[in-house]
């Protein structure tokens, strides 16, 4: 009887665990949910007859090794930098692995050995990366099979708050790991624009965001995400002229975040020496040159930034509230403060928006293909983020155990035998793209 080990019962795990428990009941599987906090694992399993909740510290290598050895497939929902020890243990014991994270160079080095052992190490199988790959490749392969040439591909995705729950000036609430939001974009963004490689360093990234107009949804801020250049070969678009993958936020977010970057509030490279009774206003004062009115001094960093300054003020970063931390980086202080005011309330709904735009050359002329996904969450627990991250992971794990996916090695879901069954299954859960084709 197959046994699945899920490591991590955090924000993105609700739909994943529910789906795997449903499969377990139908297939006579056992699902073990492991988390450093046993209460979190127990809350997800809820005494399900085919579920087991256990406490597992990732740093306890002996216990980790024991648990992985006792299961057939491992789903790691840990932060990306924690996957490698899990992967190496899976390799040692001959177990399949599924994650939602980007494939690191270190993970890729396990490819040959995993393939030789006929193991599937499926990565990049969540939302972004994940559903973005699958939905894009479906269109790319379709157009290539027609003999058409894709000259431009832009793809943006955002984890947003739904309009009906959008009640703060930032237009944002945390629906996934807050640390990842605070540190987003800190490596130089790389992309291709009209045949020219472009490199956008972190200190300019949010200041050079662009406006993205999505039909039926409105206007958003978009900023470039990580290394888009690497996806030319992965997507089979080596001759493409424009290739850009980015992140969506509501309009005005990027301007305010750029101000935080300029002020030094997103820096995670050093630890602040915070005195007792330090206020947020005092800390901000220590980041800025000169003396006097904080709002005016902030505006000197970015002229014309009154709306952005107002967002920082709303978040309490200019207040006399005490910082309840003794030792922290600026980014950690910022995270602590924003977790207080960007909280997704119990009945709030989040929203995922993913948008692809292709320019395609055909014998009849150029056309533009826009493909859009909108998914809304139910509440604080069953979020759109958890649904779109967790379900593809769960479906991939299920397909591996059933022998549907047999692409061995360290892989992403970019080949038809992988993405076709997953997209078909996702559609049954209302994760469906709408497509619009017009002249380019």
Image (tube, helix red, strand yellow):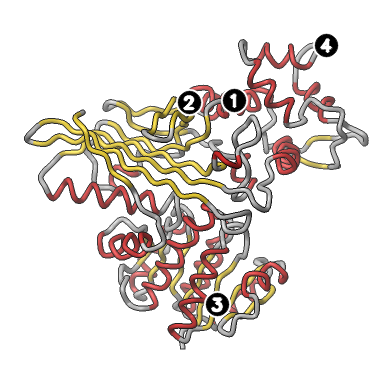
x, y percent for residue 149: 16, 39
Question: Quadrant location of residue 103?
Answer: bottom left
Give yes or no for contact between labels 2 and 3 (Cβ–Cβ under 8 Å). Answer: no
The residue sitting at 75% across, 18% down in the picture is: 288
Q: Secondary structure at mark 3?
A: helix
Seen as rendered, the residue at the extreme right is 276
Comparing 204 with 424, the one in front is 424
Give yes or no for contact between labels 4 and 1 (Cβ–Cβ under 8 Å). Answer: no
- The number of discs equals 4
The residue sitting at 57% across, 62% down in the picture is: 13
Mark nearer the viewer, 1 or 3: 1
* Residue position for label 1: 258
Mark toward the start of the polypeptide (3 vs 4): 3
Mark toward the start of the polypeptide (2 vs 4): 2
Give yes or no for contact between labels 2 and 1 (Cβ–Cβ under 8 Å). Answer: yes
The Cα atoms of the two marked residues, 2 and 3, are separated by: 43 Å
* Residue position for label 3: 68
Figure check: 394 above or below 355: below
Figure check: 51 above or below 189: below
Structural crowding at the residue carrying mark 3, measured as other residues with C-alpha within 10 Å and reported as few (<14), some (14–19) or many (≥20) = many
Q: Secondary structure at mark 1?
A: helix
The Cα atoms of the two marked residues, 1 and 3, are separated by: 43 Å
Give yes or no for contact between labels 3 and 4 (Cβ–Cβ under 8 Å). Answer: no
* Residue position for label 2: 209
x, y percent for residue 226: 46, 39
Mark toward the start of the polypeptide (2 vs 1): 2
The Cα atoms of the two marked residues, 2 and 4, are separated by: 31 Å
Structural crowding at the residue carrying mark 1, measured as other residues with C-alpha within 10 Å and reported as few (<14), some (14–19) or many (≥20) = many
Mark toward the start of the polypeptide (1 vs 3): 3
Dot label at residue 292: 4
x, y percent for residue 168: 66, 34
Give yes or no for contact between labels 1 and 3 (Cβ–Cβ under 8 Å). Answer: no
């Amino acid at each position: 009887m197959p046994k699945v080990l899920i490591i991590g019962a955090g924000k993105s795990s609700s739909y994943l665990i529910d789906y795997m428990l449903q499969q377990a009941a139908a297939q006579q599987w056992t699902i073990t949910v492991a988390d450093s906090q046993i209460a979190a694992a127990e809350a997800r399993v809820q005494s399900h007859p085919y579920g087991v909740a256990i406490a597992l510290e990732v740093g306890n290598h002996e216990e980790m090794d024991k648990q992985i050895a006792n299961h057939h497939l491992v789903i790691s929902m840990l932060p990306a930098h924690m996957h490698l020890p899990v992967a190496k243990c899976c390799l040692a014991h001959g177990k399949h692995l599924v994650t939602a994270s980007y494939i690191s160079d270190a993970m890729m080095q396990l490819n040959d050995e995993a393939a030789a052992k006929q193991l599937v190490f499926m990565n990049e199988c969540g939302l972004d990366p994940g559903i973005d790959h699958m939905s894009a490749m479906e269109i790319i392969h379709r157009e290539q099979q027609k003999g058409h040439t894709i000259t431009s591909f832009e793809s943006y995705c955002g984890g947003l708050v739904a309009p009906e729950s959008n009640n703060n000036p930032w237009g944002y609430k945390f629906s996934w790991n807050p640390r990842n939001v605070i540190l987003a974009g800190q490596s130089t963004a790389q992309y291709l624009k009209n045949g020219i490689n472009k490199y956008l360093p972190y200190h300019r990234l949010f200041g050079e965001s662009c406006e993205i107009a999505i039909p039926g949804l409105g206007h958003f801020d978009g900023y470039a995400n990580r290394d888009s250049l690497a996806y030319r070969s992965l997507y089979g678009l080596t001759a493409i002229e424009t290739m850009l993958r980015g992140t969506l936020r509501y309009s005005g977010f990027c301007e305010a975040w750029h101000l935080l970057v300029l002020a030094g509030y997103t820096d995670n490279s050093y630890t602040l020496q915070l005195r007792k009774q330090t206020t947020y206003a005092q800390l901000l004062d220590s980041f800025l040159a000169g003396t006097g009115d904080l709002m005016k001094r902030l505006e000197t960093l970015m002229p014309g930034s009154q709306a952005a300054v107002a967002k920082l003020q709303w978040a309490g970063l200019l207040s006399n509230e005490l910082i309840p931390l003794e030792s922290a980086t600026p980014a950690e202080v910022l995270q602590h403060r924003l977790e207080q005011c960007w909280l997704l309330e119990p009945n709030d709904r989040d929203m995922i928006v993913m948008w692809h735009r292709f320019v395609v050359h055909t014998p009849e002329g150029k056309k533009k293909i826009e493909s859009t996904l909108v998914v809304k969450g139910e509440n604080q627990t069953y979020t759109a983020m958890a649904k779109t991250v967790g379900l593809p992971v769960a479906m991939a794990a299920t397909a591996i155990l059933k022998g549907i996916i047999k692409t061995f090695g360290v892989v992403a879901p970019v080949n038809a035998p992988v993405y076709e069954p997953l997209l078909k299954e996702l559609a049954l859960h209302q994760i469906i793209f709408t497509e619009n084709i017009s002249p380019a």
